[in-house]
């Protein structure tokens, strides 16, 4: 049953309902998060499976079977193994620029369809792999799918959702990522018990299920009014706007979207436009949020959770079981974000989570530093449970803050003429630093040992201070009013809103 309210856009209150079409479209679009989350979760479990390691990474397999060869912290330190995980993100950061073009020229819906097809083909390569080259090709194709999905889906959700529930609907994407991670952990737990030697193929092959969901979902959903109008389909855009708002009188909102897209069409080079002075606050915040999101250490834990727990002395089954627990905490905590983001606001969630993440990671660092050495492990059952609780606390705080808001805030703050290009830069930055962390984490763990968590804690402190001073509140602010109500009111960023000083970065004030 549709609920009615007035959705504010562009300074005028527009009548709108939360229609079934909006809910269904957002759920189907956000299913791309299932695929992304499944890929994140599945790689860590697969890379801890002896059968997989024996076939593709025999050196790591020997270290796993005999930790005395390399010690607790270094038994998984292998560049090829890290490339299996990180190659996906290398492809994603390149694909995002092609996705920027398709999102603008072909629409959000078609870009999501391309992502779904790439996911399906990549899954086929991985499940059928007979050598490392096939594995990497499959991961690269999956990465291209991630690049296209992460470009189109946050834009789709922000443009379809009514203003007052925009945050909650946008976080559906992140919620599905966490569900994908949990499902992958559960599947890894099950397939690790198979004695056929092909459990890893089942784990990788079942990625086809969320890939199919995204492909079918992209055929079902309607494209956004903004995307249709941007491509000159004015009447179709108005008809879709009428359907998703559930009211007949959409003329004021329609005219505002037309005007916003007319202004955007005058921008000949959207990436050069991003460097203009007035776009600098959104560009800086979008890029820094992606960098900070990765330097919390969350993906290091999510990629390699089973490996990390084995390093701490958990047995194989226990490590996968612990990864399932953290995956479940991840899902439940993202639901907390869905509930609170449009009530408590973005800033409160970011700041509270920063403090909680620092305390959790420092606790893990102290326990590991005292009890887990290179060739000795005195962790014990009680401290092992405490480490698991601290990791869950860290995951929970990330899941209701930097996880979803790292995508939500950039997608809702870029001006319409910079939105597609800005989202590309955000996705590119995220994938670049995800690649860096995925490729480096196991080597960092080997060399820094427990200090790796002190390293991440220091970054969390920096990003919390950045939030306090430089990230404004965007709760319940219509997309087209961000400049007037957010940037021109901010103590620091307002200096970049002078319409008469619109120079490329590097020529004006920094």
Image (tube, grey):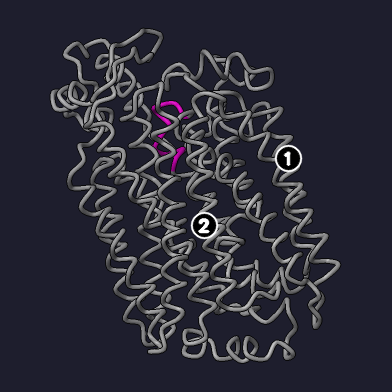
Q: Which secondary structure dominates the residues rendered in magenta?
A: helix
Q: Residue at x 28, y 11 (%)?
A: 15
Span highlighted in magenta in the image = 414-423
Q: Which mark is residue 327?
A: 2
Which image quadrant for residue 124? bottom left
284 lies above or below 147:
above
Is residue 86 left or right of 136 when viewed as pictured? Answer: right
Task: Determine the residue positioned at 53% across, 37% down.
Answer: 405
| Quadrant housing the C terminus | top right
Q: Nearer the viewer, residue 330 or 351?
A: 330
Q: Residues within 10 Å of mark 1 (few under 14, many from 20)?
A: some
Cβ atoms at labels 1 and 2 below 8 Å apart:
no
Q: Position of residue 281 (x, y in %)?
A: 59, 29
* Mark 1 to mark 2 CA distance (whole Å): 21 Å
Is 422 magenta? The answer is yes
> Closer to the observer: label 1 or label 2?
2
Which numbered marker is on residue 355? Answer: 1
**Image coordinates for residue 109, horizontal then vertical, percent:** 24, 43
Is residue 475 or residue 78 the one in the foreground?
A: 475
Residue 76 drawn in magenta: no
x then y, percent, for residue 499? 53, 15
Q: Which mark is residue 110?
A: none
For the residue pair 121 and 103, the one nearer the viewer reads as 121
Q: Is residue 289 above or below residue 454?
A: above
Query: Which residue reaches farthest front?
Result: 382
Q: Secondary structure at mark 2?
A: helix
């Amino acid at each position: 049953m549709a609920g009615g309210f007035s959705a504010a856009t562009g300074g005028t209150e527009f009548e709108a309902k939360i229609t079934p079409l909006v809910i269904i479209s957002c759920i189907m679009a956000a299913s791309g998060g299932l695929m992304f989350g499944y890929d994140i979760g599945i790689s860590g479990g697969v890379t801890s499976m002896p059968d997989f390691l024996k076939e593709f990474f025999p050196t790591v397999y020997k270290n796993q079977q005999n930790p005395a060869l390399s010690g607790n912290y270094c038994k998984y330190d292998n560049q090829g193994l890290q490339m299996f995980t990180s190659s996906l993100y290398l492809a994603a950061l390149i694909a995002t620029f092609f996705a920027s073009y398709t999102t603008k020229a072909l629409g959000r819906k078609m870009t999501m369809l391309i992502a779904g097809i790439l996911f399906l083909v990549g899954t086929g390569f991985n499940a059928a792999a007979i050598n490392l080259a096939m594995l990497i090709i499959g991961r690269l194709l999956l990465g291209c799918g991630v690049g296209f999905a992460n470009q189109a889906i946050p834009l789709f959700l922000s443009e379809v959702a009514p203003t007052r529930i925009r945050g909650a609907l946008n976080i559906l994407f992140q919620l599905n990522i966490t569900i994908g991670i949990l499902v992958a952990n559960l599947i890894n737990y099950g397939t690790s018990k198979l004695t056929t030697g092909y459990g890893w193929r089942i784990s990788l092959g079942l990625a086809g299920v969320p890939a199919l969901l995204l492909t079918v979902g992209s055929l079902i959903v309607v494209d956004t009014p903004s995307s249709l109008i941007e491509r000159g389909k004015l009447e179709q855009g108005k008809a879709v706007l009428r359907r998703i708002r559930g009211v007949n009188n959409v003329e004021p909102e329609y005219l505002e979207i037309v005007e916003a897209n007319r202004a955007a069409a005058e921008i000949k080079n959207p990436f050069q436009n991003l460097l203009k002075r007035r776009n600098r606050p959104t560009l800086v915040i979008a890029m820094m949020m992606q960098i900070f999101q990765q330097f919390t250490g969350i993906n290091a834990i999510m990629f390699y959770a089973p490996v990390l727990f084995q390093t701490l002395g958990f047995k194989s089954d226990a490590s996968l079981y612990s990864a399932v627990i953290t995956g479940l905490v991840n899902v439940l905590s993202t639901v907390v974000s869905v509930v609170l983001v449009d009530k408590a606001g973005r800033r409160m969630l970011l700041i509270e989570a920063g403090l909680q993440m620092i305390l959790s990671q420092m606790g893990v660092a102290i326990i590991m530093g005292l009890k887990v050495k290179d060739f000795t492990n005195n962790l014990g059952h009680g401290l092992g449970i405490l480490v698991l609780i601290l990791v869950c606390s860290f995951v929970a705080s990330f899941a209701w803050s930097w996880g979803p808001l790292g995508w939500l805030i950039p997608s809702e703050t870029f001006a319409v003429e910079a939105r597609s290009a800005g989202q590309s830069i955000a996705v590119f930055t995220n994938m670049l630093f995800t690649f860096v962390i995925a490729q480096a984490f196991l080597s960092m763990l080997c060399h820094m040992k427990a200090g790796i968590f002190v390293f991440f804690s220091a970054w969390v402190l920096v990003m919390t201070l950045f939030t306090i001073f430089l990230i404004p509140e965007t709760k319940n602010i219509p997309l087209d009013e961000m400049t007037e109500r957010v940037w021109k009111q901010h103590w620091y960023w307002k200096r970049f809103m002078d319409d008469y000083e619109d120079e490329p970065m590097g020529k004006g004030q920094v």
